[in-house]
Image: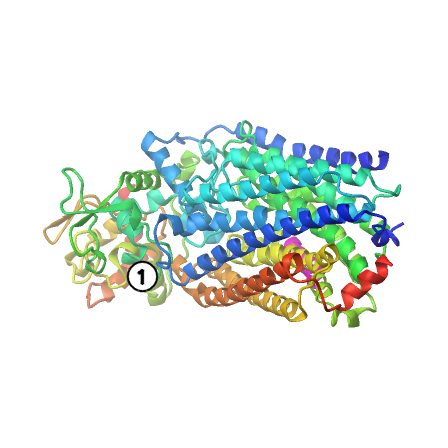
Amino acid sequence: VNKLVLIAGGSTLVYACLAWTMAVLPGIELSRVPPGPGVQPLTVLQSEGREVYVASGCSYCHTQQVRPLNQDKVFGRPSAEGDFTYQTPELLGSERTGPDLTNIGMRQPSSVWQYIHLYNPRAVVPESIMPSFNWMFHVVDRAPAGVTPVPLPKAYTPAHGVVVPSHEAEALIAYLASLKQMPVSEAEAASAPASASPAAPVGGYDAAKGAALFTANCSACHQASGEGLPGAFPSLKGDAVVNKDDATKHIEVVLNGLHDAKVGGVVYASPMPPFAGVLSDAEVADIIDYERSSWGNHGKAVIAAQVAAERGKAK
Amino acid sequence: MQTDVTARHSSLADGDNHSLSSVFCAYTATATLWLLFATGVGLLIAYKFGAPEFGSGAWLTFGRLRPIHTNATFYGFASIALVGLGYYIAARSSGAKLYSATLAWIGLVFFNLAALLGTIALDLGYNDGNLEYREWPWWIRLIFLAALVVTAWNLICTVARRSNEDIYLSNWYIIGGTLWTCIIAVVGVVPWYQYGLGQVAVSGFYMHNAVGMWFTPLALGTIYYTLPKLLNRPIYSYALGIFAFWTNLVFYPIIGAHHFLFSPLPWWFQTIAIVFSVAMLVPVWGGSSNFLLTMRGRTGDMMHSYPLMFIFVGVMSYLIGSTQGTLEAFRSLQEVWHLTNFTVGHSHMTMYGIIAFAIWGGVYALLPLATGKQAGQLGMALHFWMALVGCFIYVMSLSIGGTIQGLDWMHGLPFIQSVVDMQGYYVWRGVGGSLMFLSHIVFGWNVWRMCYGPTAAISPLESLRAEETVA
């Protein structure tokens, strides 16, 4: 029996000590990390939404950790210790089949887009392989007072009636909207990627880059066709601002975003996010030039210096 | 001491043999049902990557089925199958009868109950936080813990009855693995010390240890018993096996944080995990060379013995898959592969290549000895080749696709490009997965024959050997 005690008991004791050192102690210690500046607990509706997120297993495809690596810059600043104080269960995830959501509330502030995308992701991103969550919506004859039906594109509307989100969907979208990174320090809040931006390519506009940047940042709403979605996101094709020779307004909108935009007599409820903090001057110029030379548009091209000047005005 | 370990059970009474054999059969049969269920679900979700609308609605949505697939594979199939093998090996290698068949049956009920309730809970959306491999609601994980405790106690008491002073190496791994996993389960389930980033540290530990300190030791224990038995020769070096046991025990629990490289976990914590991931080469290469040296000069026998082929694939996967795991832990490579499908390829090379193949080798070698019934050569051949080829296609497609995915990100392409680029590889993954699933149906048939089929008329090589050994 002694040998059995030695092997079973001894190894278990060793293991218990290691588990204590490598799991329990770090767990206790890191649970005490104070919240970072501006990091707040969720509201009731947002935490309900977080529960829907967990129940639906969103974090099996979407991470919530931005690594201090170049390829993660599109998702926000690197995650900091203090970001996770109120995040139990943690949802860092281990796979990025879909994009990281750490900062999605900032990157995609439009709840209209989120509803359309949740109902059927392919309605706004044709190549998406995310499942439809249409079971979180109701089809009703007429939307109840105060509820806006989801403005689905024609191909995705039900035969009869309109689509309205359930409480589950509302909570989930409220949670996604709450996912905003707070600046870690004042210095970071003030700094724009412009300072680190590469020089504009000689000869001006880089068409391939412009197309890629448009796909990464703009086409989710304005669509690859540039036509947007009727009633939800304005078209850039033939748009007055995009085709106007004076590009000031165009640059301003890309840099600072837009609220309650009125385009061609239609008011759009979805806000457009500002890109000043995400894109460099050269990148903004590439996107604008892509928009001004695609889908039959004939706007005058801009250069990075014009963007820099506009950015300077905003400060 | 180990030379005669496989020849110790002739003195047991028929009744004891019968009760051990029914326990072994029941564990293997229910594990096989879980295998079919879990991999059927796996196949369904593999198809969803190509056809996202295939199988719609809340109950069939990817995010609910994915944890059902992983948990049912881990805690339904692999756990139950390995415990069944563990009981048989503990009793036989100790020349003792099972301490308590009743406890074994109680454990079996608990294991199955936990897996069943866990599956239902996950499908209804009761997911304990998407924390990998501890997604079942906490009270269901306590049922699983109860099953572990019962199993550990039963195994220890069985080995305590051994007829020899020495404890055969397999039992070190089997009893050790079961006891350590009780600790893992407690660490995972107690909530009061893990919040926010603290929980991230615990998750790294848990998801890694639940695999490598539970399935790996029991699979190694199975190989340490089955291989000498099939070859009728002792393990190459008993001392090397013990060395691998202790180094594995000390190094492995430290490396969990390599699942969260580049995260806000402290830098030193991540670095220690990388250093010990390299140190893991010691027990891995020690263990696999021990197995390969035991097989030396006997490759010809593999052509005649499918159990041996299964074990051989398990050993090679252990060598290759674990070495790959060490490489993946380096920051430079993790930068490419982390969060991509490469990781999914790796987890299948290890859980499937090592654990499932070791289980199958063990079952094909030992179950006929317990029941006196054989699986047909054709059945084993179909199972082996479909599983091997399927797993190869699966792992290769996700390894190549995952690398492309990571490079897409590094080159700053729009994210959706990485989704588009994966499409072809997802299709190939589905092809591999289909073959794997088909092989499991054949395995189910084989298990039926070994447990409840007609008494064997044929005597393939391995049963001849077994009879010689007994004599």
In reply to whether residue B44 is colored magenta, the answer given is: no
What's the residue at 19%, 68% (across, down)?
Answer: A296
**Image location (x, y in percent) of residue A1:** 84, 34
**Image location (x, y in percent) of residue B17:** 76, 49
In reply to whether residue B314 is colored magenta, the answer given is: yes
Q: Nearer the viewer, residue A188 or A214?
A: A214
**Helix, strand or loop status at disc 1:** loop
The quarter of the displayed image where residue A26 is located: top right
Mark 1 sits on what residue?
A126
**Image location (x, y in percent) of residue B405:** 48, 60
**Image location (x, y in percent) of residue A196:** 43, 50
Q: Is residue A307 above or below residue A210?
A: above
Q: Is residue B120 left or right of residue B180?
A: left
User: Magenta: predominant secondary structure element?
Assistant: helix
Res B170 seen here:
no
Identity of the amino acid at label 1?
Answer: Pro
Magenta span of residues: B313-326
